[in-house]
Amino acid sequence: MIKIDIFASNSVRMSKVKKGEQTIFVCDGKKCCRYNDEAKSCFKALLEENNLAGQYSICKMKCQGMCKSAPVVYLSEHDTYKKEVGKKKAQKIFEKYIVA
């Protein structure tokens, strides 16, 4: 799998990612982008610490219409959305869905 830098604009679209692929999407809509830096940084650090950076991609996604739950993260491998993701919640998501 190709590693995508979370701070660069990516060419992977959600519609092109199949269920089961190891991609973490972080919403980059108007409200989510104000709050998602902490979650992105946490996921990136955890992937690097656990030597999984080459297996997972972290990508931006367009607004998902869940602004009241910002920031929103989508885990393509599990076909799951997570809302209000900060550092603590990102760590729990990582432990439950990625290293489990």
Image (cartoon, grey):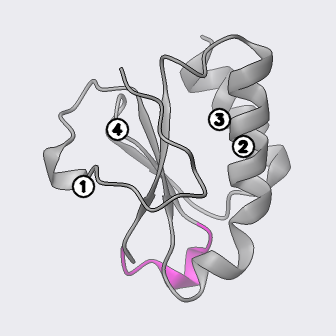
Give the mark, 3 or 4, whose residue is nearer the N terminus: 4
Instruction: Give the mark toward the camera: 3 or 4.
Output: 4
Where residue 11 appears, as percent x and y from the top left, is: 29, 54
Q: Residues within 10 Å of mark 3 (few under 14, many from 20)?
A: some
Q: Given the image, on which type of amino acid does mark 4 rest?
A: Ser
List x then y, in percent, for residue 36: 68, 66
Q: Which residue is more in the foreground, 85 or 7? A: 7
Q: Which residue is disc 2 drawn over? A: 90
According to the image, label 4 marks what residue? 76
Residue 17 location, x and y as percent? Answer: 21, 40
Q: Do callouts 4 and 1 mark residues in contact (Cβ within 8 Å)?
A: no
Residue under circle 1?
13
Of the 4 image quadrants, the one containing the N terminus is: top left
- Residue assigned mark 3: 93
- Count how many numbered circles sit on residues in the image: 4
**For the residues carrying marks 4 and 1, which lies nearer the camera in this image?**
1
Q: Is residue 50 left or right of residue 87?
A: left
Q: Earlier in the sequence, mark 1 or mark 2?
A: 1
Q: Residue at x 73, y 22 (%)?
A: 48
**Cα–Cα span, label 4 and label 2:** 15 Å
Q: Amino acid at mark 2?
A: Ala
- Circle nearer the N terminus (4, 1): 1
Question: Which amino acid, by three-letter code, is at mark 1?
Answer: Arg
Q: Is residue 21 left or right of residue 3?
A: left
Pointer 4 or 2: first along the chain: 4
Q: CA distance from mark 3 to mark 4?
A: 13 Å
Question: Magenta residues?
Answer: 64-71
Task: Give the residue type that dot 3 points to.
Answer: Ile
Tell me whether the residue at label 2 lies in contact with that at label 3, contact meaning CB atoms closer than 8 angstroms: yes
**Residue located 45% across and 77% down the image:** 66
Give the Cα separation between the discs numbered 2 and 3. Answer: 5 Å
